[in-house]
Image (cartoon, rainbow, N blue to C red):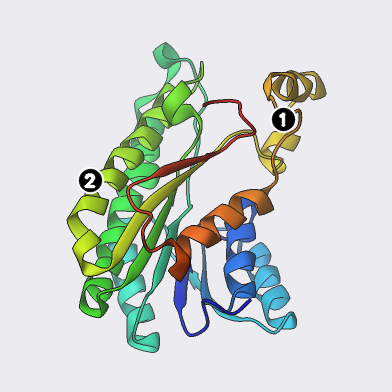
Amino acid sequence: MTELAGQVAVVTGASRGIGRAVATELASRGAFVIVNYVQQAAAAAALLAELRGAGAAGELVQFDVGDAEQVGPAVDQIVDRHGRVDILVNNAGVSANALLPRLREAAWDRLLAVNLTGVLRCTQAVLRPMLRARYGRIVNITSIVAGMGNAGQAGYAATKAGVEGMTRSLAREVAARGITVNAVAPGVIATAMIDELPETLREEYVRLIPIGRMGTAQEVAAVVAFLCSPEAGYVTGQVIGVNGGLYM
């Protein structure tokens, strides 16, 4: 598939997990993928080598979406090199699991800086070239917990719910300029983070999922790729759950 040929896609937090799967999927559809990472340099480099080995194209760009001084200059340099940004996938995120009375303010501040303000910064930075081009696809990765909640994740859920509200509001602002803004809310996805949980807890999660299994990062990436495609031009302001029926 080459429906994204000639387009430049920025995927934040692309070195592993869902971000890695999204970067791989967009590259397979012809996009030039900007692989963003913060600390996982080796994993990011391995991903880029894999993409190039498959005949795709991309580059590595290191910046922390939670740092106001890094985001703008990094995106400006991307635009200077390539002349455009067609797709932004706001995937980078952090978690801080703690019951609310025990959630430290420093952890709360980092959740906000990366998960919410980081999305704002990256989106503002790419909107300038998108508005000029009168075209763009923005997809925000949120979470099932934004809607259903989860004990011990009040802070994380608050940031993801904030992103969903931002998604809907921005979609109204930019729709007339050919830019769509959507969110994908994964449920229990088989990633390294889930693998670290005790087996009994993983089994309990699966028991609650109507489809009867965890999802894969590739299944999330397929939905993201659709929202990034020309065919999704009439889909905007939506939050699409990929959760096996766990939350409806």
Q: Which residue is mark 1?
A: 211
Residue 70 position by quadrant:
bottom left
Mark 1, Cα crowd under 10 Å, few <14 / some 14-19 / many 20+, is: few
Amino acid, disc 2? Ser
> Marks 2/1: CA distance?
32 Å
* Residue 241 image offset from top left, x and y in percent: 52, 38
Please tell me whether residue 169 is drawn above or below residue 131 in the rendered image. above
- The foreground one among 38 and 181 is 181
Image check: 73 left or right of 172?
A: right
Tell me which residue sits at (43%, 61%) in the image: 232
Residue 3 position by quadrant:
bottom right
* Residue 206 image offset from top left, x and y in percent: 74, 25
* Residue 10 image offset from top left, x and y in percent: 45, 68
Please tell me whether residue 199 is drawn above or below residue 52 in the rendered image. above
Q: Is residue 156 visible?
A: yes
The numbered dot on residue 55 is none
Image check: 46 left or right of 123?
A: right
**Callout 1: SS:** loop
* Quadrant housing the N terminus: bottom right
The numbered dot on residue 169 is 2
Tell me which residue sits at (73%, 80%) in the image: 54
Please tell me whether residue 180 is drawn above or below residue 45 in the rendered image. above
Amino acid, disc 1? Ile
